[in-house]
Image: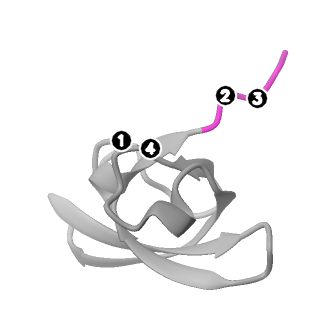
Amino acid sequence: MTSEEARIGLRVRVRDSLLRSELRGKAGTITGRWGSPEYVALDVLLDDGATQLFWHHELEEMKQPL
């Protein structure tokens, strides 16, 4: 995901390449944006109720079915 694509309210999934294996594949919703517009960090409310901070490149958008 690019910095421009990351917006509050977007449903995302943690990429499988993340070093912290316990977070890989988890889904959630972006609730906050921090930092430079070119390289944002994102607060994500995970579906299990936890909040975690990620870099934009650690997430991928979840495609909604039509």
Of labels 3 and 4, earlier in sequence is 4
Q: CA distance from mark 3 to mark 4?
A: 19 Å
In the displayed structure, does residue 49 sit left or right of residue 53?
Answer: right
| Amino acid carrying mark 3 in the image | Gln
Residue 15's place in the image compared with 55, above or below, is: above
Q: For residue 18, what is the image quadrant?
A: bottom left
User: Given this view, does label 3 or label 4 mark the residue nearer the observer?
Assistant: 4
Q: In what element is the residue under mark 1?
A: loop
In the displayed structure, does residue 10 sit left or right of residue 5?
Answer: right
Callout 3 environment at 10 Å: few (<14), some (14 to 19), or many (20+)?
few
Of labels 2 and 1, earlier in sequence is 1
Do the CB atoms of the residues marked 2 and 3 lie less than 8 Å apart? yes
Q: Examine the structure image and report whether residue 18 is included in the region drawn in magenta.
A: no
User: Which residue position holds label 2?
Assistant: 63
Q: CA distance from mark 2 to mark 1?
A: 12 Å
Q: In what element is the residue under mark 2?
A: loop
User: Given this view, does label 1 or label 4 mark the residue nearer the observer?
Assistant: 4
Report the span colored magenta: 62-66
Of labels 1 and 4, earlier in sequence is 1
Do the CB atoms of the residues marked 3 and 4 lie less than 8 Å apart? no
Label annotation for residue 64: 3
Callout 2 environment at 10 Å: few (<14), some (14 to 19), or many (20+)?
few
Q: For residue 22, what is the image quadrant?
A: bottom right
User: Which residue position holds label 4?
Assistant: 16
In the displayed structure, does residue 40 sit left or right of residue 61?
Answer: left
Q: For residue 46, what is the image quadrant?
A: bottom right
| Amino acid carrying mark 1 in the image | Met
- Give me the residue at 69% from left, 84% from top: 50
Residue 7's place in the image compared with 49, above or below, is: above
User: Which residue position holds label 1?
Assistant: 1
Q: Residue furthest front?
A: 21
Do the CB atoms of the residues marked 2 and 1 lie less than 8 Å apart? no
